[in-house]
Amino acid sequence: MKKEDKPDFGEFKANPLADKTIVLGVSGGIAAYKACDLASLMRHAGANVHTILTPAATQFVSALTFQTLTRNQAHCQQFADDIDWRPEHIDLAQKADLFVIAPATANIIAKLASGICDDLLTTTVLATKAKVLLAPAMNPRMLEHPATQNNLAILENQFRYKIVPPETGEVACGDWGAGKMASLDSIMAAIQGQLFSHQTLAGKNILVTAGGTREPIDPVRFIGNKSSGKMGIAMADAAYARGAAVKLISTVAVDRPYPVIVVETALEMQEVVEGEFDSCDALVMTAAVADFRPLAVSVQKIKKNVSEDFTLELTKNPDILDLLGQIKRPDQVIIGFAAESEELLSNTAEKLQRKNLDVIVGNDISVPDIGFGSDDNAVVIMSVSAERETLPRMPKRAIAEHLCDVISQALLEKQESGLTI
Ligand code: CTP
């Protein structure tokens, strides 16, 4: 690599929930055991976590578990003996940046919707000005019941509480249907959405691709690549947290509070991206799309004893980004990625021009421990309308946050220059 092709990357570290105080409310359902993992995840992400358990929750999990995981006292009693002059519910209510109630049972949902406060959790929620996020979990028929549906509608529409929708599946009592608590990944993404709600992308439709495509050779083999999908997922999470309506088209299946369309091959990705492109304001194409696919896919498993040599004939895949760059509307922003093993700056700049992109994010894949599969990356960002930027090694989520700023700015510039149709 030439000297001018090596941008100077420094060092950077971040915890996504650092300096945030979260009150975790646990109500009495079997999913309470999952709240233990959630408490741990939040603490490891940097949050200061305080837990309040309802009396029913303590039948499933103990205060000691949360105390140990969060390293803060866990609270159960409304009228504890050991409080100082300030009541516990006022103290926690004021400390909190966010309340997360997981699991939220039908009972706690009903109490919150009608303002009943007969335990420490409901009293504290009523006394807070912080945002409240609920992850309901209950039997599917209890969830379907009009009383629960009305209560959820009150919490969501009148109180502006954030509901992380429950998933469908087999619930603990053996019934099948919607009622399983959302995955911890979904809840964590929604938490970040609530805490970092400088909603700079509110009202914008952002389409993100993630992962590496797999091009089948026969029923068991494929041509793949090293992409883990982490950058695209971080990008989609960050845009969702900024209020965007996000759609993620991914080769990796993830549970998220926004739509995720799972695809396998470049052609499948092309079909979905092209179908969604018209309705998006910005496309972020982080996926590593295979440039070639086998010309013919063998229906049967290819046997090794057919011959000593084996030649696989490949044919070129369409370049999705290139095609969309040619048809993008003047109000749309397209961001591409460039994975380069040499001549980072010149190759990245060339792709920005050739594919008619607004922004391109280049990374040097020859640097060990970052990029493919890693949680971190170091990138150079080139744009048609702004100075080149180099971001030092940092978590992919931090890069994604920066790219959200870049997208907001690019959309604003297009709007201001009167190009919006
Ligand atoms: N891309 C695409 N369709 C392809 C290949 C790439 O949409 N068939 C997109 C990627 O998602 C990425 C950008 O194009 O945003 C650049 O991908 P990259 O693999 O770095 O470059 P290529 O265009 O494939 O060029 P080369 O492999 O020659 O470096």
Image (spheres, rainbow, N blue to C red):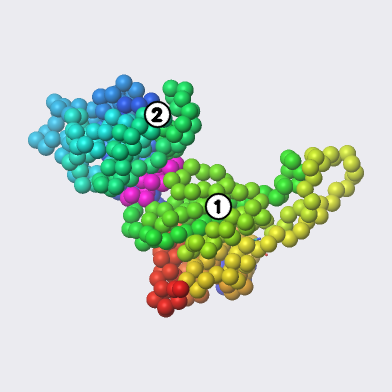
Closest to the observer: 3 or 311?
311
The span shown in magenta is 185-195
Alpha-carbon span between mark 2 and mark 1: 32 Å
Above or below residue 70? Residue 334 is: below
Looking at this view, name the residue that lies furthest to the bottom. 417
Q: What residue is pinned by disc 2?
A: 141
219 shown above or below 9 = above
242 relative to 251 in the view: left or right: left
Q: Is residue 321 visible?
A: yes
Whether residue 63 is in magenta: the answer is: no
Q: Kindly give the residue lying farthest to the front in the view shown.
A: 146
Disc 2 to disc 1: CB gap under 8 Å: no
Residue 375: x and y in percent read 50, 49
Query: What secondary structure is marked by label 2?
Result: helix
The prevailing secondary structure element of the residues shown in magenta is: helix
Front residue of 140/207: it is: 140
Disc 1 Cβ-to-ligand 1 distance below 8 Å? no
